[in-house]
Image (cartoon, grey):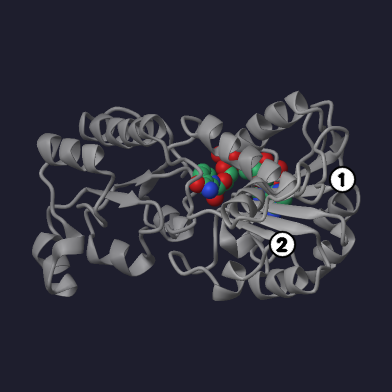
Amino acid sequence: MVVAKEYAPTQQRLEAEFTIHKLYEAPDRDAFLKCHASSVRALATYTASGADAKLMDALPKLQLISHFGVGYDAIDVGAAKQRNIMVTNTPDVLNDCVADTAMSLVLNVMRQFPRSENWLRAGNWREVIGYPLTVSLGGKTLGILGLGRIGEAIARRAQAFGMKIAYHNRNRKNLPYAYFADAASLAKNCTVLLIATPGGAETRNLVDAKVLDALGPKGFVVNIARGSVIDEPVLIRYLQENRIAGAGLDVYVKEPQVPPELFALENAVIYPHVGSGTVETRTAMGDLQLENLRLFFAGKPVKTRVV
Ligand code: NAP
């Protein structure tokens, strides 16, 4: 069963290779689930369209949830575990693109390239050197909150830009980067706080007023993780009051809704959740989702199991 319409090429291959029931097209969801309850063994879930305990209970033969996306906070993994349902995701294949997106947010919020282009297009360039000076990346510390697969790819890129790397994870890693025991002490010791943790209950509002106070008026925050990791109303207030220098955001609490206040803020760079948004990466994510489904139906171990 397919929960939401997927990336078109993946969707086409799903339809070609498997018997598909499209939950997202069902006019009566409950009746549709009842009709297919005795046959559905696998679910294909897609980015923010996941699976909760109620959906799992409606499909008693369910054995696998194959997710398109590395972040699986839209799936109740605890409920899946209790019901012996496997969950797979699509890690690693998106690291490079998401890290590229993260670095572009760091560049754009510190160097203000989008804002300077808007300034030029608005006809403001009347003297040879006109746009206000910005902040350079070289020599500054990038504090990575969540130094995992994507975080490490970001760290490698940031080093090429001459940045120093610090991080906080719950578990310290054997890497030559400065480690801080919590988010606030990391924020206090960096110029850019870059969030790359998973979303979900465990990281909700991990970046709150205390962390933003520690970052201070010369500090920037960049979020490519999930909107839920930052206390969004507090972030907006801190940007409005210039209590931090700026924010680069790819993700929001209630996507696709973006808080309207952010559109008015010149110290915010905002993207529409495009972290992994390239043809190559979305194709690779779809391939991995399909591979897990194929292996499962062939009775073989799946490739990228979460639980
Ligand atoms: P990962 O390899 O699991 O890395 C996550 C890191 O976060 C780990 O190092 C983990 O270390 C740390 N972490 C987890 N909980 C934490 C907590 N409470 N406090 C501090 N650190 C914590 O995952 P990934 O593949 O790098 O992906 C990270 C996330 O990026 C995904 O879950 C997804 O939400 C997001 N993402 C966004 C986009 C986009 O388009 N914007 C695309 C892909 C992924 P410890 O376990 O030691 O704490």
Quarter of the render that holds ligand 1: top right
Query: Foreground: 54 or 138?
Result: 138
Image position, residue 302 (x, y; %) = 35, 32
Identify which amino acid the numbered label 1 is placed on. Answer: Phe
When the figure is inspected, residue 62 is found, relative to residue 8, above or below; the finding is below
Amino acid tagged 2:
Leu
Q: Residues within 10 Å of mark 1 (few under 14, many from 20)?
A: many
Q: Which mark is residue 180?
A: 1
Left/right of residue 79 with respect to residue 60 in the rendered view: right
- Disc 2 under 8 Å from ligand 1? The reply is yes
Q: Secondary structure at mark 1?
A: loop
Estimate the x, y position of residue 257 in percent, counting from the top left: 46, 69
User: Residue 224 vs residue 29: left or right?
Assistant: right
The foreground one among 124 and 71 is 124
Disc 1, ligand 1: is the CB inside 8 Å?
no
Disc 1 and disc 2: Cα gap in Å?
Answer: 15 Å
| Nearer-the-camera pick, 157 or 87 | 157
Instruction: Pick whichever of labels 1 and 2 is earlier in the sequence.
Output: 1
Q: Which residue is mark 2?
A: 206
Q: Which quadrant of the view contains residue 236? A: bottom right
Whether residue 233 is situated above or below residue 58 in the rendered picture = below
Residue 158 as seen in the image, left or right of residue 296: right
Above or below, 24 relative to 190:
below
Q: Residues within 10 Å of mark 2 (few under 14, many from 20)?
A: many
Q: Residue at x 56, y 52 (%)?
A: 121
Residue 296: in sight, yes or no?
A: yes
Q: Residue at x 82, y 47 (%)?
A: 133
Residue 72 appears at what percent x and percent y?
46, 51
Residue at 43 percent of width and 61 percent of height: 79
